[in-house]
Image (tube, rainbow, N blue to C red):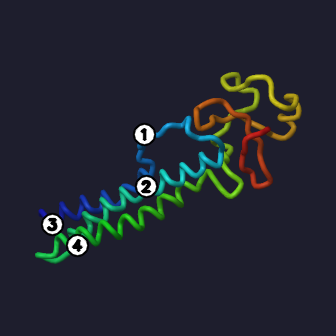
Amino acid sequence: MKQFLSLAVAAAVAAGPMAAPAVSFAQDHSSYRSWDDYCHAKKKQGQRNGAVLGAIAGAVIGSNVAGHGNKTTGTVVGAAGGAAVGSNVGRDMAKAKCDSSGAYWDRGDTYDYRDRDYYHGGGRHADKWYERRGCRWSRDYENRPVRVCPDRHGHYRVAD
């Protein structure tokens, strides 16, 4: 029964990075000078979170898989392997909102251009210009409303 429980715990820990990839570590959003900084920070955050969760899962699994008398070695090897895999998975998952052109939003992350909770006047162009291009609103990394317009791939990017 004890071994079954250990395996169940190991499976739950191993599934953790997939079920909840966004472990939150405190971060100071004011340090972002640009959207490139934001994307770089998100990638590094995902990589760090993945490495931590992967190391924990790998240590538990390695300890449970190792033969009697080899638990320490199994734990260390499992933690190292889990950290490496988790780091790559976390980094790749963080790319979901950043690409070589910078940060972007999916339509589901945006709000109608005339949504009263987000809309505010101003901008480089008249409202009709933004509306004709299918622009919408979203929240930036400091949780402020930001005007975003679709690119040719359907990603919404910060409008000028």
Mark 3 in CB contact with mark 1 (< 8 angstroms): no
Q: Which residue is mark 2?
A: 48
Q: Is residue 15 left or right of residue 122?
A: left
In the image, residue 116 sits, relative to residue 157, either above or below, namely: above
Q: Residue at x 23, y 65 (%)?
A: 7
**Viewer-nearest of discs 4 and 1:** 1
Discs 4, 2 touching: Cβ within 8 Å: no
Q: Earlier in the sequence, mark 3 or mark 1?
A: 3
Whether residue 23 sits left or right of residue 32 in the image: it is left
Between the C-alphas of marks 2 and 1, the distance is: 12 Å
Q: Which residue is mark 1?
A: 26
**Res 78 quadrant in image:** bottom left
Q: CA distance from mark 2 to mark 3?
A: 30 Å
Q: Which residue is mark 4?
A: 74
In primary-sequence order, the first of circles 4 and 3 is 3
Dot 2 or dot 1: first in sequence order is 1
Please tell me the numbered disc located at residue 3.
3
The residue drawn where x is 77% and y is 42% is 149
Please state which amino acid type lies under the numbered disc 1: Ala
Q: Residues within 10 Å of mark 4 (few under 14, many from 20)?
A: many
Q: Residues within 10 Å of mark 3 (few under 14, many from 20)?
A: few
As displayed, is residue 12 above or below residue 148?
Answer: below
CA distance for labels 4 and 2: 22 Å
Q: Amino acid type of disc 3? A: Gln
Q: Say whether disc 4 or disc 2 marks the residue closer to the N-terminus.
A: 2
Percent of width and height locating residue 147: 73, 35
Q: Position of residue 110 (x, y in %)?
A: 67, 38
- Which one is nearer the viewer's eye here, 31 or 101? 31
Helix, strand or loop for disc 4: helix
